């Protein structure tokens, strides 16, 4: 009797060990499957988040470009040409001061691609309006500051400019006129896609806006016939 009891106990112990090993093996398989599924799901989730962030970045950049370029102003004097320079990688123009805390007036704006340690980036910079030398205004005399990054790689941008006859050009030199519209093509270099948008310049280019600095100078000069008697 004693020997039979001991044999039964050993058999029960062996069966319990087999159950434990099978349970551990099943648990390992389940955990491995969960890890594989979770890894794929997380990769897709991360890609979705990155894509959404990039789409939002592009949307914000398009809104900023459209708002700035549509507000380009035609400011000139009798001895100066209006400032508007356009290339495929950047544009410089004059617009009203942007921001609730800014004083009324004008400012220079430059939006162009620049290279830094992280690669090419589309950067917006500004400078207070000032008088430029007579003739063809030189943009290298303008002290641009306050850089704001609008886009980074993998996005690149190309500008194009429309004349009054509707023809598009890759550059807009100093011609005494402003383009009627500015198109900006944003290319996703990694995916090979292009997003195009355009901004129409609302200013009446045929009626130049007088230089506010010149108006102030004229206001300080004495008027004939109104001097002291």
Image: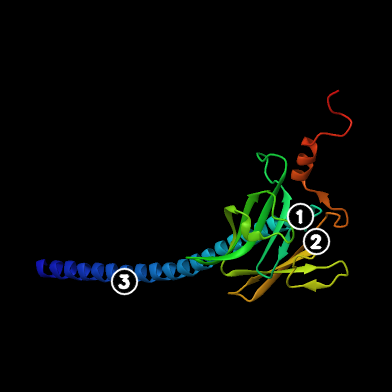
Q: In the drawing, what numbered circle is on residue 22?
A: 3
**Sequence order check, earlier mark of 3 and 1:** 3
Q: CA distance from mark 3 to mark 2?
A: 80 Å
Quarter of the figure with residue 120: bottom right
Q: For the residues labelled 3 and 2, say whether their Cβ atoms are less than 8 Å apart.
A: no
Considering the numbered disc 2 on the image, is that residue within a helix, a strand or a loop? loop
Residue depicted at x 40% and y 68%: 30
Work out which residue is located at the far bottom of the displayed protein and give it: 192
Q: Nearer the viewer, residue 38 or 155?
A: 155
Q: Give coordinates of residue 121: x percent, y percent.
A: 57, 64
Which residue is rendered at x = 78% and y = 48% of the image? 211
**On screen, residue 172 above or below 216:** below
Dot 2 crowding, Cα within 10 Å, few <14, some 14–19, many 20+: many
User: Considering only order in the chain, which callout, 1 or 2, is on the residue closer to the N terminus?
Assistant: 1
Q: Are marks 2 and 1 in contact (CB under 8 Å)?
A: yes
Residue at image mark 2: 178
Which of label 2 and label 1 is nearer to you? 2
Q: Is residue 55 visible?
A: no
Question: Relative to 144, is 195 above or below?
Answer: below
In the rendered image, which residue does mark 1 sit on?
72
- Counting residues from the start of the chain, the first of labels 3 and 2 encountered is 3
Relative placement, left or right, of 115 versus 71 is: left
What coloring was used for the rendering? rainbow
Quarter-of-image position of residue 64: bottom right
Q: Position of residue 81 (x, y in %)?
A: 77, 58
Q: Nearer the viewer, residue 5 or 144?
A: 144
Q: Secondary structure at mark 3?
A: helix
Mark 1, secondary structure of its residue: loop
112 vs 210: above or below: below
Q: CA distance from mark 2 to mark 1?
A: 9 Å
Q: Quadrant of the C terminus?
A: top right
Q: Is residue 25 left or right of residue 82?
A: left
């Amino acid at each position: 009797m004693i020997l039979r009891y001991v044999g039964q106990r050993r058999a029960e112990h062996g069966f319990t060990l087999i159950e434990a090993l099978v349970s551990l093996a099943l648990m390992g398989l389940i955990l491995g499957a969960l890890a594989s599924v979770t890894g794929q799901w997380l990769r897709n989730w991360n890609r979705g988040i990155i894509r959404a962030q990039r789409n939002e970045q592009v949307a914000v950049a398009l809104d900023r470009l459209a708002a700035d370029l549509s507000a380009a102003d035609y400011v000139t004097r009798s001895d100066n040409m209006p400032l508007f320079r356009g290339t495929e990688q950047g544009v410089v123009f004059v617009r009203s001061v942007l921001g609730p805390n800014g004083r009324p007036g004008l400012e220079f704006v430059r939006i162009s691609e620049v290279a830094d340690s992280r690669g090419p980036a589309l950067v917006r910079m500004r400078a207070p309006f000032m008088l430029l030398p007579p003739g063809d205004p030189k943009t290298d005399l303008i002290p641009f500051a306050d850089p704001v990054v609008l886009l980074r790689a993998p996005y690149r941008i190309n500008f194009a400019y429309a004349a009054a006859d509707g023809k598009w050009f890759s550059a807009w030199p100093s011609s005494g006129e402003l383009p009627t519209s500015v198109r900006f093509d944003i290319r996703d270099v990694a995916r090979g896609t292009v997003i195009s948008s355009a901004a129409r310049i609302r200013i009446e280019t045929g009626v130049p806006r007088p230089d506010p600095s010149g108006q102030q100078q004229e206001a300080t000069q004495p008027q004939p016939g109104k001097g002291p008697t």
